[in-house]
Amino acid sequence: MSPSVDGPADFACTCFSGETGYDREKLDDRRSCAHCRRSPRLPSSSSSCSLLSLESFPVAEYDKPWRILCASVKGFAIGAGLKGGLALFAILTRFRRRRLLTSAKKVDMASSSDDLILAVKETMRYGLFLGTFAGTFVSVDEIIAALGGHRRTARWRALLAGAIAGPSMLLTGLNTQHMSLAIYILMRAAVLASRCGIKSKQFGRICKPLTWAHGDVFLMCLSTSQILSAYILKRETLPPSYKSFLNKQVGKPTFIVQGVKEVVCGVPFTTLEVIEKHYKTMGDDVKLDPQMKIPCSIIHGSQTCGGHVLSFLIQAYKRALPVYLPVYLIPALIVHRQGLSKRPLTILGKGLLGTARSSLFLSLYTSSAWMWTCLLFRLFQRCNVPMLAIGTFPTGLALAVEKKSRRIEISLYCLARAIESFVTCMADDGYLPKSKNLKRADVVVFSISTAIIMHCYAIERDVFRSKYLNVLDWVFGVPLPPYDTTPRKNS
């Protein structure tokens, strides 16, 4: 990744021979080196000559300050772009909601100017966070390479630089916890580490079960059991933003969820009258039995379980479409903006197909949650915490509808939230000690995770998917193989 000419090469890629150097026949047949996926003619670990260009071009001279500046600016652009896009979508959603509310309810909501100021602040914070992370990583990487030598420090330099850059997360707010993000990044690091283990001779057999074709669906089922059980029983253990997302997608008012909780826990009812009034306003004059053993009438009134699932699926699909439209169409407009002029129907068609498919997944996910729990409760004529956990487990099977490349992303995202919720539940129940000294455990977890990820990026690049590798190369500059050398900048 950084320059210095020293020490013998202790390992090499398939394009390199320790005796003769590069095998030109191999390099002529392949557009890039298999180890580093870069052209062997690139003389620099930072192959960008324009600050925010989406292309990478070779430079004639190695320029360390330019590499640091490029990484910082590009990191800031990614952080600000992602957070700004999400903030803009949230502002538009709240603006639409504000227009539909009465004047009395509008008073309780924040004004549009307050929302805008908060969005700008959050956008800047996340831009500074990723910009500082990228700049710190590259700076530490260059300093260590200059002091210790590129080849001698190649094996551990990125690991240390990634760990040192991790505390950049504090720039999002000194008092703002990001444990969900930290755990998600840890899951990503664990996936990369497991891929490295599968390749190795020492750990190949141990990591063999991780190659199971449907492991992502199984992880989703495990995560769903914890997430949906916590949503009904201990909602405070879920992150506020994720809880808000579930509130909308689950499609039931909070007092109905509370009624289900009271049946599951076997405690006296407090919401039956409110639920009856709710169904009465919808034209369903249902009478709820205070001695009920299963909560089907609370969930869907006098409607049958099967009829409820079908009607809920249609409404859930309508709720899911606005979630995935920006997820697919905005990247299509940004990443494929040049191709849109040449093949607009193909690119937009893929975006719309992906939107339809992902919306079907989310709608099946939420509707099957009610279907499986109703089925299990009616089958065994009982309702308790274990039955709820078992009933929500097969809900994760809905992930099979998604594209294979997206399954692991979604399952890891949900697994991070499930782990956070589970640990919080265990700590609240007294099974885990609460640390008073370690106030920012999220920063520690994030730093460990980024150390692993950046080490894999520098040494085990083939464990990354190409789209992630391209983004990392664009930000940090394509790293040199450990056996390579870097030309010095001319004075």
Image (tube, rainbow, N blue to C red):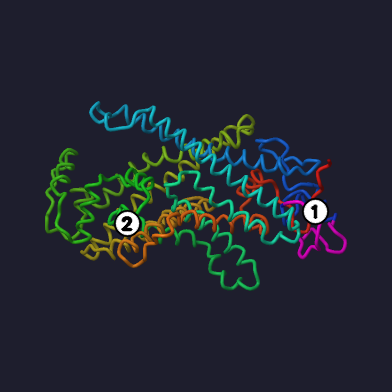
Mark 2 or 1: the one toward you: 1
The residue that disc 1 covers is: 485
Q: Main secondary structure of the magenta part?
A: loop
Q: Would you say 98 lies left or right of 35 here?
A: left
The part of the image, by quadrant, that contains residue 372 is bottom left
The x, y position of residue 8, in whole percent, is 81, 63
Amino acid type at image mark 1: Thr
Q: Would you say 444 lies left or right of 139 here?
A: left
Q: Would you say 310 lies left or right of 298 here?
A: right
Judging from the image, what secondary structure is the residue with disc 1 in? loop
The x, y position of residue 255, in whole percent, is 22, 47
The residue closer to the viewer here, 192 or 367, is 192
Distance from disc 2 to disc 1, alpha carbons, whole Å, reads 54 Å
Magenta stretch holds residue 322: no
The residue that disc 2 covers is: 230
Image: magenta residue range:
2-23
Judging from the image, what secondary structure is the residue with disc 2 in? helix
Marks 2 and 1 close (CB-CB < 8 Å): no
